Image (cartoon, grey):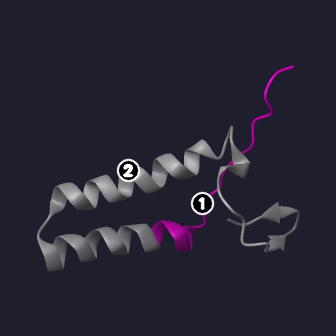
Amino acid sequence: MGSKKYKVVIAESGKRDVKNKKHYIIQFFKYREYAESFSQKIKRAAMQLNTFPTGYETTGFQYRGMIFI
């Protein structure tokens, strides 16, 4: 039996949040490598949900059949 794939969609507000946090780290801590690592880890975690959607606890919020983490 093949594993079911899900489609992960990151809201624009979520993308902005990650981008803003990345800029904050660079601006206030002057640590670009950490900011890049933070951004990549968030993206990687989100993409892991394609094949392992129960890997993170959900918020319980559902909208139009979509479950938000």
Name the spot of residue 38 as percent of width and height, x first: 34, 59
Which quadrant of the rendered structure holds the C terminus? Answer: bottom right
Residue at the image position 79 percent from the left and 74 percent from the top: 61
Residue 40, numbered circle? 2
Q: Quadrant of the N terminus?
A: top right
What is the C-alpha distance between the residues marked 2 and 1? 14 Å
Image-based side of 37 in relation to 13, left or right: left
Hey, what amino acid is under mark 1? Ile
Residue at figure coordinates x 80%, y 33% from the top left? 4
Q: Secondary structure at mark 1?
A: loop
Q: Position of residue 14 (x, y in %)?
A: 53, 69
Residue 61 is left or right of residue 22, and the answer is right
| Residue at 42 percent of width and 67 percent of height | 18
Residue bearing mark 1: 10
- Left or right of 23? Residue 49 is right
- The residue nearer to you, when weighing 34 against 65, is 34
The amino acid sitting under disc 2 is Gln
Residue 49 in the image: above or below residue 9? above
Apparent side of residue 63 relative to residue 37 in the rendered image (left or right): right
On residue 50, the disc is none
Q: Residue 31, how many percent across, how many down?
A: 14, 64
Question: Within 10 Å of the Cα at label 1, are there few (<14), some (14-19), or many (20+) other Cα atoms?
Answer: few
Specify start and end residues of the magenta stretch as a single range.
Answer: 1-16
Viewer-closest of 63 and 51: 51
